[in-house]
Amino acid sequence: MSSDTTRATDTTDSAAFWENHYAGVDPQWGTRPNAVLAEVVTALASEPGSGGGGRALDLGCGHGGDALWLASLGWDVTAVDVSATALERVAAGAAAAGLTDRVHPIRHDLARSFPDGTFELVAASYFHTPVEIPREQVLRRAAEAVAPGGLLVLVEHASLAPWSWRDGHEDVTFPGPDDVLASLRLGDGDGWRTERCHAPERTATGPGGETATVTDNVIVVRRGRHA
């Protein structure tokens, strides 16, 4: 397995926050795939390589629920997070599932660096953080990493769950899906096609088994095959 889970010597706010977060989270939390991502991939990219090569990039992979699920379908997955603790758990999960040849955990602070190459599927599930980062810039870089014919899948919070890592006292306003799509600044020359751009509700389950109705932004765009 190509893996870089090195605990970097930098002490950025992002690294410190997410290391502390994962240190206090049950290692089994977040090891199942995001239901929205699973539905989108099943509907629009059901066969690895349908865009031309079977490479997937999971940004902010956490404990690897999405990455491990994609690998189980045959995708070759680069799983990126700023937390070395999270990535160590992804590597352990891949080993336990016999997926070490298809899951490649690598540490990036995406405000500073980004994986090389292009991918037939680029996914970011709940890429939110309380730490100030150039989020729109990162998501535009994610779009650039999509290979011709490939998909960019963004599943984002449009409301807060009661168990959110936010302190519960913030006055949070999330952009709508159309605003998120516009912020990507997709060039007409690349032949992008919008597959999904909406804000459905769903029932979410928290780390303690509690449930709540939440709203997600779901943005799925496909790059033209001749980009």
Image (cartoon, rainbow, N blue to C red):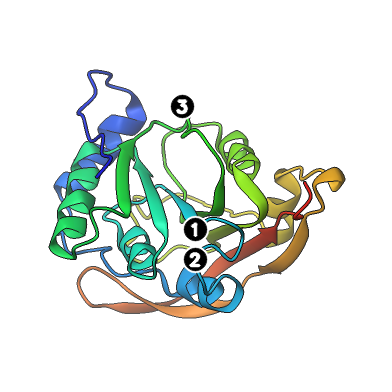
Q: Say whether residue 74 is left or right of residue 29.
A: right
Estimate the x, y position of residue 39 in percent, counting from the top left.
51, 77
Q: Residues within 10 Å of mark 2 (few under 14, many from 20)?
A: many
Estimate the x, y position of residue 155 in percent, counting from the top left.
53, 61
Between circles 2 and 3, the one closer to the viewer is 2
Q: Nearer the viewer, residue 131 or 226?
A: 226
Compared with residue 209, is residue 120 higher up or lower down, i.e. above or below?
above
Q: Which mark is residue 54?
A: 1
Dots 1, 2 in contact, CB < 8 A:
yes
Estimate the x, y position of residue 213 in percent, counting from the top left.
45, 78
Q: Residues within 10 Å of mark 3 (few under 14, many from 20)?
A: few
Q: Which residue is mark 3?
A: 113
Q: Quadrant of the N terminus?
A: top left
* Mark-to-mark CA distance, 2 and 3: 26 Å
Which of the 4 image quadrants contains residue 63? Answer: bottom left
In the image, farthest residue toward the right: 188
> Element under label 3?
loop
* Mark-to-mark CA distance, 1 and 2: 5 Å
Estimate the x, y position of residue 99 in percent, counting from the top left.
24, 60
> Element under label 2?
loop
Q: Nearer the viewer, residue 80 or 185?
A: 80
* Mark-to-mark CA distance, 3 and 1: 23 Å
Q: Which residue is mark 2?
A: 48
Which of the 4 image quadrants contains residue 72? Answer: bottom left
Q: Specify the amino acid type for callout 1.
A: Gly
